[in-house]
Amino acid sequence: MRALILAPPKIVLQTAARDWVDAAGGDAVLFTDLAAKDAVLAHAKGAFAEIHFFQDYAGSGRVETQALDFHRVDPFLNVIALAESDVLRAARLRERWGLGGLSPQDARLFRDKYEMKRRAERHGVPVAGYRLAASALDLLAFIEDYHYPIVVKPVDGKGSAGVQVIADRQALDAYLESPDFTQGRSPLVESFVAGDMYQVNGLYLDGTCVLVSCVQCVHSNLQFLDGEWLGLKMVAPSNPLWPRLCAFGQNLLEQVLPMPRNGLFHIELFHTPDDRLFLCEAACRLAGCLANEQIRQAFDVDIRVEYLKAECGRREPAEDLRYPPRRLVAELNVPPQPGTLTSLPERAPFDWVAVYKAYARVGQTYAKMAYTNGEIASLLITGETEEQLDQRLREAADWFTRATCWA
């Protein structure tokens, strides 16, 4: 099946060329970003029939117009999106060509956080107070109803860019003078939910949820953007919260949101001190950073490859993919610090680190991240219990901080 695959370089580079061939058949066409052309060509040699690169790939309209040109010559039989920025454009192309799958209207429910929360609330899913704010007066009215702190965010944002917690009037005034407000669209404003953040990630095949991985976030995405390390610690199936997280996710995707029959998913939710679960947001794609590899290490299955196989007609229908986790794995992601990197460890000195990936270059100057996909290093850490994972996360983070130097 000739498919058009839309993916940023980071995702392309996470899957070996032989696995791309196994999943998509070798006749797929890849559209990706020009910025990593050399790395993609070296990594994915022979994996695709053609690879085409685009300047400013995430925002380029040429991705869609060139897809139309290619389709006229040799029609695609599917369009597969693997990242947030591609979900809507892939849906538009499939609708244009009559290919079925997630429609643009349904895709917007995964991209427009206001419409997502409206749908969830109508179906009884707990959500924080929320509203679109077209003006400063709207924000003040929301604060009168819900009080500080509040959270403001773009309705269709990605990577936590533009998300702010506003704790008082001084912070509100600063926000109202910032480009996020003066140059942006009406933000979504939400009441602040105190508690721990969890993620539910997984895979649907033929309408059935075949794999679920639940993780607890150690530090938040906003702390990550502000320079703190981000830990993603797997929840053990023996934890009483595990079945509740799984049930929350399946109800959301099977009864509320239009989850396609084949699809990857990523759900963020809050667990409050009084033991309630609240939806933060959901996406029809896998989590970022090393989520796919974390799941592969824990479950011994590459869910991105299995999803691609299903979409490209290369998976045997009789295969049973209802996988239990075989071990617990935590993910540690380290952001850059403002300054020039002068030293970076080449490997981790712990036998419980299953994967160590350093992305940064010594001698390069960095700034604070704009999105939660700009980490300079990622580690996958194994452990016997959640408590051991937590201890090892902190030990590894402390080691990396001491072993890395900035000027």
Image: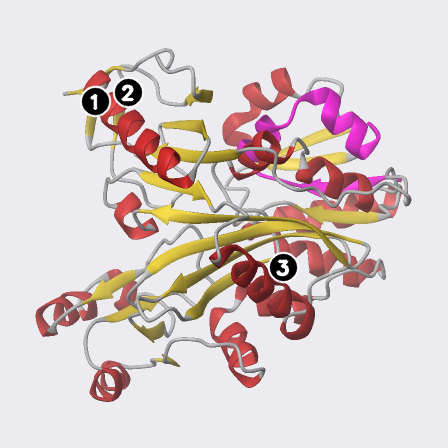
Does the magenta-highlighted stretch encompass residue 17?
yes
Q: Secondary structure at mark 1?
A: strand
Badge 1 local density, few (<14 within 10 Å), some, or many (20+)?
some
Whether residue 61 appears in this view of the structure is no
- Under tag 2, what secondary structure? loop
Residue at 60 percent across and 23 percent down: it is 40
Q: Amino acid at mark 2?
A: Gln
Q: Is residue 319 above or below residue 135?
A: above
Label 3: state its secondary structure: helix
Q: Is residue 160 left or right of residue 225?
A: right
Badge 2 local density, few (<14 within 10 Å), some, or many (20+)?
A: few
Image mark for residue 340: 1
- The magenta span reads 1-27
Question: Mark 1 belongs to which amino acid?
Answer: Thr
Upstream in sequence: badge 1 or badge 3: 3
Rendered image coloring scheme: secondary structure
Whole-percent x and y of residue 228? 25, 40
Specify the quadrant of the image occupied by residue 368. top left
Residue 336 in picture, x, y percent from top left: 28, 32
Instruction: Measure the C-alpha gap from mark 3 to mark 2.
Output: 34 Å
- Residue drawn 47% across the image and 37% down it: 289
Quadrant, the N terminus: top right
Task: Tally the marks.
Answer: 3
The vertical placement of 404 against 293, above or below, is above
Q: Position of residue 230 (x, y in %)?
A: 34, 40
Q: Nearer the viewer, residue 71 or 189?
A: 189
Residue tagged 3: 88
- Circle 2 residue: 364
